[in-house]
Amino acid sequence: MLRKWFAIPLWKRVLGGLVAGLALALIWPEAAPKVAVLGDLFVRAIRMLVAPIVLVTIAAGITSLADPKRLGPLGGRTVGLFALTTAIAVSVGMAVAMLIKPGVGVPVGAAVPKALGDPVPLHDQLVGIIPLNIVEALAKGDMLALIFVAILAGVGTVLAGEPGKSFAGLLQSLSAVLLRIVGLVMEATPIGVFALIANAVAANGGAVFVNIGWLALAVVAGSLIQIVLVHSLILRFLARLPVIPFFRGIIDALVVAFSTASSSATLPVAMTVAGKNLGVSPGVYSTVLPLGASIGKDGTAMYVGLLSIFSLQAFGVPIDAGVLAIVLLTGALAAFGTAPVPSASLFMLAAVLSAVGIAPEQTALIVGFVLPFDRLLDMTRTVPSASANLTVATTVARWEGELDRSVYLAPPVR
């Protein structure tokens, strides 16, 4: 039976777990909290791997590029593409909100305000990129600090030349071991998805589709536009690659993104599909994808733009070209600084709404209104973030000549 189970492609097993979780939540919702521990264990196992993967694989990816002259162009293209997709995503969210108008007539006043916490000053965010203690940054999972350390270690290893080769080999070995561990954890995905979906649906029931149905529709529409239109156009015209093999090869990563609602938790499986199914070289995907987990937030950007217009509509604030420009700029910057964890984008609203005159007390009402239903919305909008990271990795690999086209076009490895 075990052989038959593992012979089934992972995405099919995950889909079966999703359907089973949905069925349990609808037929026997009282049982859903009892299996929630399985979902918590699955997410913890994935997140346990994220910090060491970011630290080791970015450094290993840089050392595998070998030539210091290539590091600058690779980083510049990567950040530039992420900036492009993020700005487009904010625009898509704003446009969908203007078209569907999900915030008009919403009874925000009846919501219980949700404390937002003290915003971190920009100075502190910038200074915090350089950690005082590498071990502490690793323990806290401080992504920006870990990325800085990893880049520094990778560049230093490359510049060291011959003496640095043994350390580069160690990094490559550690990276390979971590990815094997990821493969083991991924086998538990169907069980984790079953528990996560059952608990999320049982907790919210049909209210997600009744109380904020228009917002849910807008989130789904924005996510589909970003994935099907924007990412497809980037692949077709910037990478000059057919689109269907790409989406066929990343199904596993998208399913994990949906079930965990976390870009960082999706990172391990994204790296696996990038190498096995898309033909992206380890040097590129181990550099681009961990960076994307921190700054590649298409879903968050789309949602921040959408929810900003939703809030303005709910409070009856006039929306003109100046307001739209401010939301676009601040929304893109806020999305870049959002932590890759569930519901983090909700708490970035204050930065955007304060720029257009919405008081923190009003923002707290919006968060209080949306938060009870946010789990499923968050699961939905994490999918375009995962798709964006893989789109950028594939495009950059194509530009750098680090993409195996025969692997890309071949049926995906399950």
Image (cartoon, rainbow, N blue to C red):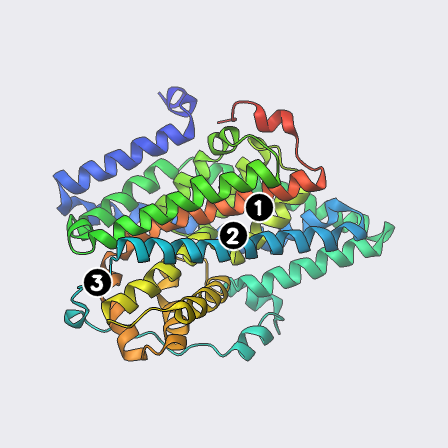
* Rendered location of residue 163, percent (x, y): 85, 53
Identify the image quadrant of the N terminus.
top left
Q: Would residue 42 be visible to someone looking at this image? A: no
Distance between the alpha carbons at the discs numbered 3 and 1: 36 Å
The amino acid pointed to by label 3 is Val
Q: Which residue lies at the image location 53% right of the left edge and 36% below the top edge?
A: 273
* Residue type beneath disc 1: Val
Residue bearing the label numbered 3: 104
Q: Residue 77 in the image: state x and y as whole percent.
A: 66, 52
Q: Residues within 10 Å of mark 3 (few under 14, many from 20)?
A: some
Residue 2 point in image, percent of width and height: 38, 23
Res 392 label: 1
Q: CA distance from mark 3 to mark 2?
A: 28 Å
Q: Is residue 181 left or right of residue 94?
A: right
Q: Disc 3 on helix, strand or loop? A: loop
Q: State the residue position of label 2.
A: 85
Say which amino acid is labelled 2: Thr
Q: Residue at x 16, y 56 (%)?
A: 211
Residue located 49% across and 79% down the image:
121
Which is more foreground, mark 3 or mark 2? Answer: 3
Q: Dots 2 and 1: beta carbons under 8 Å?
A: yes
Q: Which one is nearer the viewer's eye here, 390 or 159?
A: 390
| Left or right for 17, reference 408 | left
Pointer 3 with pointer 2, Cβ within 8 A: no
